[in-house]
Amino acid sequence: MTAGRPTPERCRVVRIIARLNVGGPALQATVLATGLDPDRFEQHLLSGAVTDDEADYVRLRAPDLAVQRVAGLGRDPNPTSDIKALVELRRAIRAVAPQIVHTHTTKAGVLGRLAAWSAGVPVTVHTFHGHHLSGYFSPRVTKALVMSERLLARRTTRLVAVGTQVRDDLLDAGIGRPDQYVVVPPGVALPTLPARDEARHALDLDPDDLVVAFVARLTNVKRPDRFLAMATAIAARHPTARFVVVGGGDLFESVREQAAPLGDRIRFLGWRSDVETIYAASDLVVLTSDNEGMPVSLIEAALCGVPAVTTGVGSAAEVVLDGVTGRVTGLHTPQLIAAVDDLLGSPSLRRRMAVEAAAHANRHFGASRLVRDMDELYTSLAINGRAELSARRWGV
């Protein structure tokens, strides 16, 4: 926490996230923590710990980020640790007395909002970086989760969705009202892109290879099995095709074993801090998920001028414009194979899509745009929050 008492002019924001593993929520929290004007916003970031099969975003990409760790505020639910985390969150919130508490991810959204309400915080914001309406849990668990989100939404000041399709899916599930939502797409900043030859040399890839990258957690919802099926078919059609898999997760070892027939045509690189090197070396990025919010890996690829093929889930189609910056397919593997085959077979098409991808991403998904959008949202909510507190004080 920041030492000393805050000045009255600054808006105090407590941001709560379950864990800062490599992925979109951690990236967005980091961009806001470092990008918002410190003269106008006093920010406090609370987070739980990553699990053993996850990469720590702070260690890999943001070692200077100030984070207050909250025991028990992690991925897995546990009644005992959850209660302890709730008590600690309430204590931390009361110590800051923020105008706004902003929560990210499901578990932090539940515990963080409960703690904020019990501490009398006037404004709460929750960001849906995606949703768990399909591809994650059994129908019974999904139904319970939807009911919980419906109840929480009733008392949340603003609901932020990373894309219009994510917002529409949540509204269709009865979560929140249309007037509660604001769509704020992710904002991404990457280090300077290395030269293509330099990136390929660093990854031990031949200059003439056709490089297809998969950048994601290796877990069921990302469907790495679908990627392997696509890679096997493409390897037979394109002798110079090579595949790089960037990420870890609970399926890492099993996926690597399943990929053995591809031999040296596929490389497993684990989590990397220099994702810009991966994109600089790639001709194409592929995402094969059953469910997504707005995939940051697709945004990163586009910013680096790399076209993509993705399944049309969540708000992926708001990043990859079908036929313009890449291809959006259904969930069937033959559709993915056809799209990847088409792009790898046409260098001119890839070049044209690369230019369009970079232009689209820079217009819509830059870090400065995210900071500007959230500045405007926080400022308007803080003014309303102060008015509400004043009304309570005077009994209005």
Image (cartoon, helix red, strand yellow):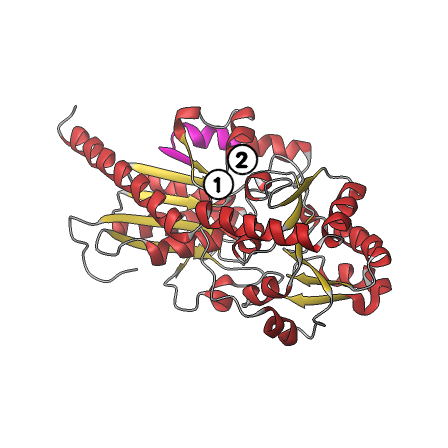
On the picture, is 68 further left or further right than 130?
left
Quarter occupied by the C terminus: top left
Name the spot of residue 261 as percent of width and height, x first. 86, 63
The residue closer to the viewer here, 320 or 100, is: 320
Quarter occupied by the N terminus: bottom left
Q: Which residue is denoted by mark 1 in the rendering?
A: 162
Looking at the rendering, which quadrant does residue 118 occupy? top left
The stretch in magenta equals 148-159
The residue closer to the viewer here, 24 or 197, is: 197
Query: Is 207 above or below relative to 372?
Result: below
Q: Are marks 2 and 1 in contact (CB under 8 Å)?
A: yes
| Element at label 1 | loop
Cα separation, mark 2 vs mark 1, equals 7 Å
Q: Which residue is denoted by mark 2 in the rendering?
A: 166
Q: How many marks are shown on the rendered structure?
A: 2
Name the spot of residue 220 as percent of width and height, x first. 70, 49
On the picture, is 40 further left or further right than 186?
left
* Residue 170 visible at all: yes
For this orientation, the residue located farthest to the front is 348
Looking at the rendering, which quadrant does residue 386 occupy? top left
| Magenta region includes residue 173 | no
| Magenta region includes residue 152 | yes
Q: Amino acid at mark 2?
A: Val
Query: Is 198 above or below relative to 327?
Result: below
The residue closer to the viewer here, 213 or 340, is: 340
On the picture, is 345 further left or further right than 165?
right
Using a 10 Å C-alpha cutoff, classify the residue at mark 1 as few (fewer than 14 neighbours), some (14 to 19) or many (20 or more): many
Q: Amino acid at mark 1?
A: Val
Name the spot of residue 6 as percent of width and height, x first. 19, 54
